[in-house]
Amino acid sequence: MKAGGTPLSSAATMPSPLLLWRFKVLLLFVWGFSCCKIGWDSVMRMGGDLQDLFLYEAFLYYNPLLLMTLMVWLWGINLWVFSQSNIGYSRIFDLDQNCLTHQEVWKCATWLTIIVPTSMTAYLYLYSHGEVSLAASQPVLLYAALAMTLIFPFDIFYLSSRYFLLRTVWRIVFPLQAITFPDFFLADIFTSMSKVFSDLERSVCRMAHRQVASIAWFEADSVCGSHAVAIPIVLVLPYIFRFFQCLRQYKDTGEKSSLLNALKYSTAVPVIFLSALKYHVIPDNWITFYRPLWLISSVLNSFYSFYWDITRDWDLSCFTRIFKFSKPHTLSYLLYGRTWVYFWAIGSNLVLRCTWTYKLSAHLRHNYITVFTITALEIFRRFQWVFFRVENEWNKMNSKPSVQMSMVDNPAEEEKLLGSNAHNV
């Protein structure tokens, strides 16, 4: 009797999942408040002249990781909506049955939310208390730990998902094979994170040259400074990768729309390099010649990208269908079939496409808080874009069998359809 009663008593003492979740949220808020308090007190210990410089350096090392954390959180929301609306995202991205669920993505985001601010708080505290060498080691250890976690070859911490990500990145950098939906989908996301990659490059550069927590980083013309040639090069790389993907798609399918898409990505190149020229040409030449060219290229890039989003990447005929959940939900009630969603998605996409040009232009990036905000808004725009782009692809995949059946008597048309993978990149 005693042995039989033990499992019952154990089950009775187990806390409910809701209680555990509330306790975890409480701990997260306590930890977040502690980090904010310690970080603020550390900044206040610095002299008035050094506070802004001190914050700018800490911002450079940690803002790209914070933005990547935001992207992971939003991707988890994307997957949650897909699961609620019965969108087969594993089929769209050609994933196996062991792919990450939205809960697992949020678990990764939670760990990043804890680790990155904790490292930043340690950096601020140690630097303000005179432990400069220990402070300098904090971002270095964080970057090394995240890189090792990503490439760790053993079967722990979602090995298959990490391998899929690294393989897709390799295919983006070297588009030597037919372009698949995951290839250009991730490459499009990378274009929204070009500023993140640029800051990562500058951070790693300063770590490699031992400039962390030193005044050397303030020299704008140094090898890792704000006027470095590497900045526009890194900014433009995601667009170059996407450009060559479109050329590869045209080679495989012969679709002229791929060339028009390649032209869209090429319009970002003059925006980036004309802006960077400000620091390398005579000021009068910049004002009279290069700045007007930069303005024209900026307007062209913003409106061309906006037009492509609305007419090609999204299918407005079935807009918001992705928010039709299989079970009743408040979010579905607010978004599905609502006219205001059309106006919000189109209007916000236009505005954020224009502000994104601000971020690509190095000569406008004077206030790092403003740049951080605009980059975060661009990530939010891409988060919105994901819903409608995946919905469009899902509708195409569902209509593909009927199209193929109608072409069974025309082998040439069928071969062309299958060869194009039905992807409009």
Image (cartoon, grey):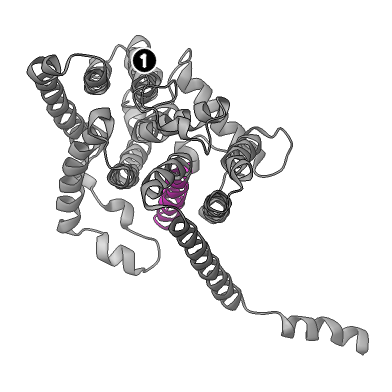
The magenta segment? 66-89
Give how far across and how far down residue 249 sits, in percent. 36, 16
Q: Nearer the viewer, residue 78 or 118?
A: 118
Q: Which of 57 and 183 is in front in this view?
A: 57
User: Which residue position holds label 1?
Assistant: 244
Q: Where 209 falls versus 333 (above or below)? A: above
For residue 94, say whether it is visible.
Answer: yes
Q: Where 41 falls versus 61 (above or below)? A: below
Left or right of residue 339: residue 99: right
Left or right of residue 114: residue 375: left
Q: Magenta segment: does it hold 276?
A: no
Give how far across and how far down residue 231 sits, in percent. 37, 24
Q: Is the magenta stretch mostly helix, strand or loop?
A: helix
For residue 182, say whether it is visible.
Answer: no
Question: What residue lies at 23% left-to-right and 40% top-to-bottom?
Answer: 315
Residue type at numbered disc 1: Phe
